[in-house]
Image (spheres, helix red, strand yellow):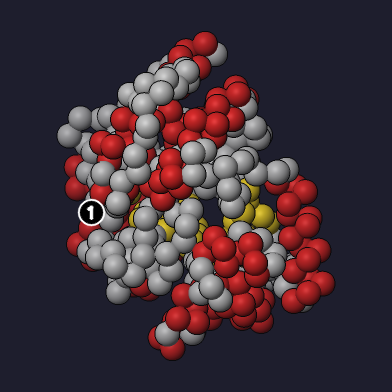
């Protein structure tokens, strides 16, 4: 089998990642994802409607997490401009998206973040923010984020790899767990995660290695029990998300010699029932530069939507986008393995 080599900066080397995922590396006996779809009558994969408008407002982040599929960090300079945000607002105004999912990087580091949230809320949309928690403590200018989120009834979705420091810090950096706990307590203090408050606080679990997540329901029960017992923390739901073999996690798989075994795990765990609710069928993902993708993971592989010239927010064509074929690849096995996986957790 050909030896796979990791790139120094995987997110910048899209063709390297796609070549590996499409099995140009010899010796990997992995069927094409489209063959799996064809066998169950889902090829080509088609959208079901406009539900979620996911926007990556920039790749700058105060953390450098080992599993990050965005390859975000303090050194990233890609930031969505206010002009592009305005184009997003025009699309939201004229289409029936119910939820706007703001992500990054740390989305709060975009200088126009708060303005963007306020303008989206004026359109009557539900807003979710993918908050890494530690950003709340990173600088005094972020300390009031819990109050800002509460004022605009923003749903907060936050990554917490585990309910102890050792496993969390190994994945996200030294000291991250303690800061995350403090941030969660700050969110609880203003009402987030509290019963009947209407302020939603959800946590995200990603496996720390080359394995699939355990039962989402069991993980949620374990997290709720441990966080309440040890830190008096409450939250609403836990989303278990499978790590997809792209960017930093792809590099980890190659460097550790786990790539082939992990891909085989994903293929063997393929669940036809998970295909029906794939997030790419009801979600559009907007890159920091305004280009449109079927999902956040395709965005990180620079696999733009297949809708001709309507692949940028400035040329949004609802009919063309609704009629498109969704772009898939072998990384999609991560979303169809086991109980399925999406930005909202298990799909079955």
Residue 240 in percent (x, y) is at 63, 48
Viewer-side residue, 318 vs 251: 251
The quadrant of the rendering that contains the C terminus is: top right
In the image, what residue occupies the spot 28% across and 56% down? 288
In the image, what residue occupies the spot 60% across and 64% down? 168
Does residue 102 appear anywhere in the picture? no
Does residue 348 appear anywhere in the picture? yes
Answer left or right for 291 relative to 175. Answer: left
Q: Report which residue position mark 1 lands on.
A: 289
Answer left or right for 85 relative to 107. Answer: left
Viewer-side residue, 168 vs 345: 168
Residue 22 in percent (x, y) is at 36, 26
Q: Quadrant of residue 120?
A: bottom left
Which residue extends farthest bottom? Answer: 140
Query: Regarding mark 1 in the picture, which secondary structure is present there?
Result: loop
Work out whether 217 lies above or below 124: above
Disc 1: CA contacts within 10 A as few (<14), some (14-19) or many (>=20): some
Residue 266 in percent (x, y) is at 56, 30
Viewer-side residue, 221 vs 211: 211
Work out whether 277 lies above or below 64: above
In the image, what residue occupies the spot 65% across and 44% down? 213
In the image, what residue occupies the spot 41% across and 50% down? 248
The quadrant of the rendering that contains the N terminus is: top left
Work out whether 228 lies above or below 67: below
Tally the numbered discs: 1
Q: Quadrant of residue 280?
A: top left
Viewer-side residue, 151 vs 276: 276
């Amino acid at each position: 089998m050909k030896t796979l080599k990791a790139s120094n900066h995987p997110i910048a080397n899209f063709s390297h990642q796609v070549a590996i995922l499409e099995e140009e590396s010899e010796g990997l006996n992995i069927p094409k994802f489209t063959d799996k779809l064809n066998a169950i009558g889902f090829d080509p994969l088609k959208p079901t409607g406009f539900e979620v408008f996911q926007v990556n407002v920039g790749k700058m982040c105060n953390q450098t997490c080992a599993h990050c599929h965005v390859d975000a960090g303090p050194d990233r300079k890609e930031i969505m401009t206010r002009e592009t945000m305005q184009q997003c607002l025009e699309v939201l105004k004229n289409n029936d998206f119910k939820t706007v999912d703001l992500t990054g990087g740390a989305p709060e580091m975009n200088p126009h973040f708060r303005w963007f949230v306020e303008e989206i809320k004026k359109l009557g949309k539900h807003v979710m923010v993918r908050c890494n928690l530690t950003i709340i403590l990173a600088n005094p200018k972020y300390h009031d984020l819990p109050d800002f989120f509460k004022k605009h009834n923003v749903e907060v979705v936050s990554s917490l790899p585990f309910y102890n420091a050792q496993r969390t810090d190994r994945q996200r950096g030294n000291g991250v767990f303690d800061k995350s706990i403090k941030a969660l307590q700050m969110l609880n203090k203003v009402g987030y995660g509290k019963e009947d408050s209407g302020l939603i606080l959800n946590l995200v679990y990603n496996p720390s290695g080359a394995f699939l997540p355990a039962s989402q329901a069991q993980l949620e029960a374990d997290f709720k029990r441990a966080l309440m017992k040890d830190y008096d923390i409450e939250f609403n739901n836990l989303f278990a998300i499978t790590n997809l073999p792209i960017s930093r996690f792809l590099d980890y798989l190659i460097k550790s010699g786990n790539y082939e075994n992990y891909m085989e795990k994903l293929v063997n765990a393929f669940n036809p029932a998970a295909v029906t609710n794939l997030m790419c069928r009801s979600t559009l993902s907007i890159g920091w530069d305004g280009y449109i993708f079927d999902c956040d993971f395709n965005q990180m592989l620079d696999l733009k939507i297949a809708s001709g010239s309507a692949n940028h927010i400035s040329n949004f064509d609802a009919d063309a986008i609704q009629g498109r074929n969704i772009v898939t690849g072998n990384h999609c096995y991560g979303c169809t393995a086991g109980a399925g996986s999406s930005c909202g957790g298990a799909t079955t």
